[in-house]
Amino acid sequence: MIELLILYELTKKVLTMYGISKEIHQQFSVLTTPSYGTIKPALVRLEKDSCVKTQKSISSGGRPSVFYSITPRGKEVLSELLLSPLQDNPIQFLTTARIRVSCADVLEKQEQKRLFKLIKIKCESIKYDIKKLIDETSSQYNKKLVFDNLMCEYNNFILLLEGLDRACGS
């Protein structure tokens, strides 16, 4: 997921590692907060895979700075990451799906529609599993409330996806 976020931020402008961290924090802190210890190795991997390129310069204070920019290959990889199969783990699914939907503006309209459809299908599958759990835990009040709340969360997310899909047009 960190590679997706880095590439997404680099589609907007050239950034230093600090700038990437700051932008991710500003844009996605309610969903994820990656550390420098996560960002740095991801940048090394992305550079090795020719997804980003670096330019070294000396700042006005005489300190060396490394600026990262996305390459054409990086843009392709970003699209692939956005449209790749979704995680099966329901705990991670909603966060991952929200991040992908937030970054979907870099995709063409048809790719956006495809992404929204993939996520919606997975949401419906998880909702089915939640419904079964609600039925099985009818005597366990706290657990039932948690699952009911989760069902509402998925219903709301599906409504969001449907609205975004309509906004993409046909």
Image (tube, grey):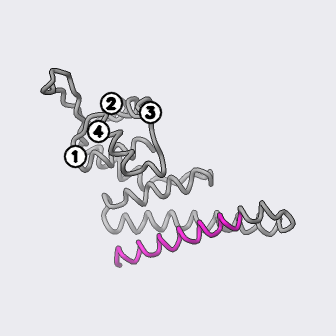
| Dot 3: element | helix
Q: Main secondary structure of the magenta part?
A: helix
The disc, 3 or 4, on the residue closer to the chain's N-terminal end is 4
Q: What is the C-alpha distance between the residues marked 1 and 4?
A: 10 Å
Residue that numbered label 1 is attached to:
13
Q: As drawn, is 135 to the left or to the right of 123?
A: right
- The magenta stretch spans residue 67: no
Q: Depth check: 79 or 152 in front?
A: 152
Name above or below for residue 15 compared with residue 132.
above
Given the current orientation, which residue lies at the most extreme right position?
Answer: 139
Q: Depth check: 116 or 33 in front?
A: 33
Q: What is the C-alpha distance between the residues marked 3 and 1?
A: 20 Å
The disc, 1 or 4, on the residue closer to the chain's N-terminal end is 1
Dot label at residue 19: 4
Q: Position of residue 159 (x, y in %)?
A: 51, 74
Q: What is the C-alpha distance between the residues marked 3 and 2?
A: 16 Å
| Dot 2: element | helix
Dot label at residue 48: 2
Which one is closest to the eye, mark 4 or mark 2? 4
Which one is closest to the eye, mark 3 or mark 2? 3
Q: What is the C-alpha distance between the residues marked 4 and 2?
A: 20 Å
